[in-house]
Image (spheres, rainbow, N blue to C red):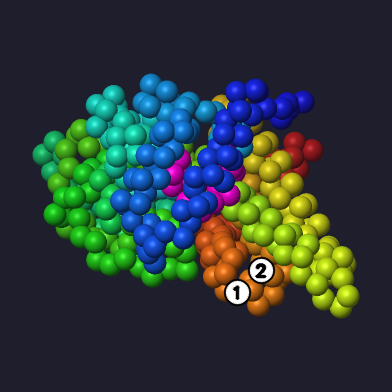
């Protein structure tokens, strides 16, 4: 039996986070320093200073590196509260891609790399990016198509390649680069991660891509690596084990996305409930019409299922289970349920919902890409079905 009861200290942290978001973060949501490619770095640093003062900075990182040292279950409730404002995860320094990168560094990096990169990341002094996705014909949903290569050169490597949709690359100090270090990728081997200074002149930011979402500082960028020479100290983990480390990052990162966006969906739902309570049509409030009332009820059920799914998968991860299957299922369940919640909320608001007079229109644009980010729903379904068929074959063989 899984105990979902929150320890008193986590309940207190949850409540403090909710108050901080309501009293300090939400009043800043109309700050003009929010661009088409994310909030500016000076605005982000001001938010981080607020969270630091409130004792809420970097809840996911170990205390020895300056964080609060929460496990996945603690993160589940705190991240949801942070996500109630689109600025909340930025303030707490627990937004993607930095949150996932910090987790990866904490697990894989050397002590020297942690001192150089993890400590300032945890303090919110710098940002980072993760360079894995490539345009056609490189790696997207299929990581075995990785085209960026690192050629041996003395005691180091020379990296050449083309990446795109690299979140936060503009203005990032650290760049985790996935490159092929073998002739081919086989059985998950042959790719290596490199942790490098993103300000190297050999790293070209070709452009910042225009996307439907606008909540990530630095936007989403297209990059080229022009014979970037790296040394042995720039290798993150072991040579050839990049995809294994990618799972270290991606399985929890999928779940933390679910946590944050669940908070945003709850915000959209609350706005819709408030509107349905006061807006009248055909002689009664909207909420009294079954068509609207049932949509609100469906929202409640989608959020309930999402929250239970997150908590269960978080519990598995806390037990040391890789939970790859559960991570994939959680990502699909939550991404699609969260989108439905926000979509219904917009529908309830009617014409108001498609304007910037409420935050729902913005939340809609932010959560829609989540069905694609960190693996499209279809890829996760394929992975789940592949495992299902494999287990079924084994059972038939035994029978």
Q: Is residue 86 above or below residue 120?
A: below
- Secondary structure type for disc 1: helix
Q: Is residue 389 left or right of residue 167?
A: right
Check contact, mark 2 vs mark 1: CB within 8 A.
yes
Position of residue 367 measured from the top left corner of the image (x, y, whole percent): 56, 60
Marks 2/1: CA–CA distance: 7 Å
Q: Is residue 107 left or right of residue 282?
A: left
Residue where numbered disc 1 is placed: 354
Circle 1 residues within 10 Å: few <14, some 14–19, many ≥20: some
Q: Is residue 238 visible?
A: no
Q: Is residue 172 left or right of residue 396?
A: left
Q: Is residue 34 left or right of residue 340?
A: left
Q: Which residues are magenta?
A: 78-92
Circle 2 residues within 10 Å: few <14, some 14–19, many ≥20: many
Position of residue 95 measured from the top left corner of the image (x, y, whole percent): 45, 46
Is 387 a magenta residue? no
At 79% from the left edge and 38% from the top edge, which residue is drawn? 399
Position of residue 356 measured from the top left corner of the image (x, y, whole percent): 54, 70
Disc with the residue nearer the chain's start (2 vs 1): 2
């Amino acid at each position: 039996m899984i105990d979902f009861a929150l320890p008193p200290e986590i309940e207190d942290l949850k409540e403090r986070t909710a108050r901080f978001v309501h009293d300090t973060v939400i009043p800043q949501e109309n700050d003009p320093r929010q661009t088409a490619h994310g909030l500016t770095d000076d605005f982000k640093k001001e938010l981080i200073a607020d969270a630091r003062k409130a004792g809420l900075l970097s809840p996911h990182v170990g205390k020895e590196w300056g964080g609060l040292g929460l496990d996945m279950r603690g993160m589940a409730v705190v991240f949801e509260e942070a996500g109630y404002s689109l600025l909340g995860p930025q303030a707490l320094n627990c937004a993607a891609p930095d949150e996932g990168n910090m987790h990866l560094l904490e697990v894989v990096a050397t002590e020297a790399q942690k001192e150089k990169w993890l400590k300032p990341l945890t303090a919110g002094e710098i940002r980072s990016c993760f360079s894995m996705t490539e345009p056609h014909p490189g790696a997207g949903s299929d990581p075995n198509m990785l085209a960026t290569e690192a050629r041996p050169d003395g005691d180091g490597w020379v990296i050449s390649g083309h990446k795109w949709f690299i979140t936060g690359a503009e203005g990032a100090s650290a760049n985790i680069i996935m490159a092929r270090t073998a002739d081919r990728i086989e059985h998950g081997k042959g790719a290596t991660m490199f942790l490098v200074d993103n300000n190297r002149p050999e790293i070209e930011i070709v452009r910042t891509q225009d996307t439907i979402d606008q909540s990530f500082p630095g936007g989403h960028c297209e990059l080229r690596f022009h014979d970037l020479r790296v040394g042995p100290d720039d290798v993150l983990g072991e040579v050839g084990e990049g995809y294994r480390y990618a799972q270290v990052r991606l399985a929890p990162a999928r779940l933390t996305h679910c946590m944050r966006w669940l908070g945003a969906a709850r915000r959209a739902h609350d706005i819709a409930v408030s509107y349905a309570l006061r807006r009248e049509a055909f002689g009664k409030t909207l909420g009294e019409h079954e068509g609207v009332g049932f949509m609100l009820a469906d929202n409640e059920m989608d959020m309930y299922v999402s929250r239970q799914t997150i908590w269960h998968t978080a519990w598995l991860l806390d037990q040391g289970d890789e939970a790859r299957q559960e991570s994939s299922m959680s990502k699909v369940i939550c991404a699609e349920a969260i989108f439905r919640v926000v979509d219904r909320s917009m529908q309830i608001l009617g014409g108001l919902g498609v304007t910037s007079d409420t935050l729902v229109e913005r939340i809609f644009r932010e959560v829609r890409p989540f069905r694609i980010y960190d693996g499209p729903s279809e890829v996760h379904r394929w992975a789940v079905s592949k495992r299902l068929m494999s287990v079924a074959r084994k059972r038939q063989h035994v029978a």
